[in-house]
Structure formats: C-alpha cells, structure tokens
Amino acid sequence: MFKKAFFSVGLLLSVLLLTACSTIKPVLNLTNQPVPANMTSSQVATHIMAGGKERGWYMTRVKPGLIRGSIEVRQHYASVDINYSSKGYSISYRSSRNLEYENGQIHRNYNRWVMNLSESIQASLKGVQTTTAHKKREVGVKVDY
C-alpha cells in the first residue's frame, strides 16, 4: 500500500514538473498597448520602428497603421504585425519557422521576444534608451551610449 501511494505521488510530481518545464506556451498577442497622450500616429510609428531596431527586429512599414516586424535568431524566425494609431498599438503573431507553432501554441522564446519588443517600444515612447547585449549580438551594430 505504501509503495503504491509513494509511486503515485512520484508519478504526479514528475508529470507536474514536466508540464511546468514545457517549452510550448500559448502565443502571446499584445493588444491596446498604451502610448503617451497627444502623440500622432506618425510619431508612434517612429517609436515602434526604433523599439524594434533596438531589439534586433527588422521593421517594415506596410501601410499607415501597420508595421511588420521580423526577427531571426540562429535558425529560428518570427514575424509579427503591429497595428498602431495615436491611441496605442497591438502586436500580433504573423508567422514563424522552427518555433514549433501549432494550434495557437509556440515555443516560449517567441513570447519573450514579443515582450522584449514591446518593452523597447515603450522605452522609446517614453524617451528612455535601453542597453541590451542582445542588440549588439543580433544586429551587429556599433552602439554609442
């Protein structure tokens, strides 16, 4: 009886541990991220472009109100659409390669990249310069601080 209970508890803990350590997470889409008041949509676009560049993303203005960002890290690739206005911006999953995307689930690194992108956009909107080793490594640009 004791061995059976011990085995059951051990099995349950193993399953919980494996679940907690999973590299697959729901895709993170950020909606209605705030921008400072009295900013034009053109100014918002400029800060989105700057924030993306800060993190090593390649940013392309597709049309007014839409910027497409992409990033390649080693053999992994992700692309997002960033819809924006003078009121805010939203970052949405577009496509990926080698990030195990399936049914709204993706490798957790994608979510981290999107959060970092949004943080850099917010910093640019607030006039704060961030420093990241990631920027130097990914983009390979000289950065003067």
Image (cartoon, rainbow, N blue to C red):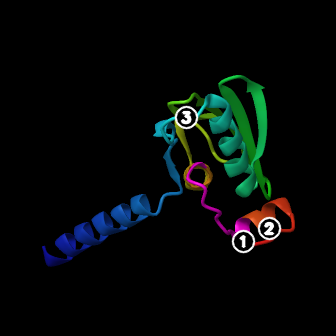
Q: Which residue is tagged 3?
A: 89
Of label 3 and label 2, which has the lower sequence position?
Answer: 3
Dot in front, 3 or 2: 3
* CA distance separating discs 2 and 1: 6 Å
Q: Does residue 80 show up magenta in the picture?
A: no
Give the residues drawn in magenta, as a range.
125-134
Mark 1 residue type: Ala
Residue located 79% across and 59% down the image: 74
Instruction: Using residue 130 as the reference point, say whether residue 71 is left or right of it.
Output: right
Q: Is residue 64 above or below residue 135?
A: above
Q: Which residue is tagged 1?
A: 133
Residue 104 lies, in percent from the top left, at 52, 35
Q: What is the crowding at mark 3: few (fewer than 14 residues within 10 Å), some, or many (at least 20)?
A: many
Q: What is the crowding at mark 2: few (fewer than 14 residues within 10 Å), some, or many (at least 20)?
A: few
Residue located 72% across and 34% down the image: 68
Helix, strand or loop at disc 1? helix
Residue 35 lies, in percent from the top left, at 51, 40
Q: Is residue 98 visible?
A: no
Residue 5 lies, in percent from the top left, at 17, 71
Residue 29 lies, in percent from the top left, at 51, 38
Q: Main secondary structure of the magenta part?
A: loop
Mark 2 residue type: Arg
Helix, strand or loop at disc 3? strand
76 or 60, which is in the foreground?
A: 60
Helix, strand or loop at disc 2? helix
What is the quadrant of the C terminus in the image?
bottom right
Q: Which residue is tagged 2?
A: 137
* CA distance separating discs 3 and 1: 26 Å
Residue located 56% across and 54% down the image: 119
